[in-house]
Amino acid sequence: MSNSPFPSKRAPAYQHIPDEKWNDWRWQLTHRLNTIEDFEALFPLTPSEKEALSSSGLFRVCLLYTSPSPRDRTRSRMPSSA
């Protein structure tokens, strides 16, 4: 991992991504989660979650937010804790 004060753990699907890319906000934005299929590749979704993600005008999620928080190392990051 990099010398970042808060090294980021990654979802297993992204373990192969080099730190230089993972820690680059431009890379994060270009590889954000955009579709229900993108989310399902990382998380099991309930029918209600799938319905919510089908709504129009939703924001999309950068991969960094799929990682455990550096503060507690167990929960996924939420924008308020980034």
Image (cartoon, rainbow, N blue to C red):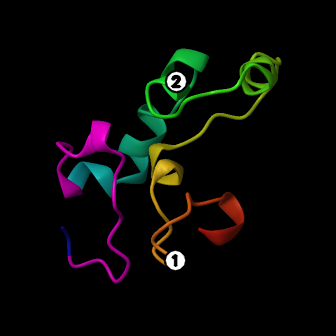
Per the rendered image, the range of residues in magenta is 3-19
| Residue 18 placement (x, y as % from top left) | 17, 50
Whether 65 is drawn above or below 43: the answer is below
Work out how far the residue at label 2 is from the one at label 1, CA to CA, in angstroms: 24 Å
Classified by dominant secondary structure, the portion drawn in magenta counts as: loop
Instruction: Residue at 41% x, 33% y: name it.
Output: 31
Q: Nearer the viewer, residue 26 or 12?
A: 12
Instruction: Residue at 50% x, 48% y: name it.
Output: 66
Residue 35 located within the stretch drawn in magenta: no
| Residue 48 placement (x, y as % from top left) | 80, 24
Residue 16 located within the stretch drawn in magenta: yes
Q: Is residue 65 left or right of residue 4?
A: right
- Tell me which corner region of the image, top left, top right, bottom left or bottom right, holds residue 1: bottom left
Quadrant housing the C terminus: bottom right
Q: Earlier in the sequence, mark 2 or mark 1?
A: 2
- Tell me which corner region of the image, top left, top right, bottom left or bottom right, holds residue 30: top left
Q: Is residue 34 left or right of residue 11?
A: right
The residue at which mark 1 appears reads as: 72
The residue at which mark 2 appears reads as: 40
How would you rate the neighbour count of disc 2 (Cα within 10 Å): few for under 14, some for 14-19, many for 20 or more?
few
How would you rate the neighbour count of disc 1 (Cα within 10 Å): few for under 14, some for 14-19, many for 20 or more?
few
Instruction: Residue at 20% x, 71% y: name it.
Output: 2
Q: Nearer the viewer, residue 67 or 48?
A: 48
Is mark 2 in CB contact (under 8 Å) with mark 1? no
The three-letter amino acid code for the residue at tag 2 is: Glu
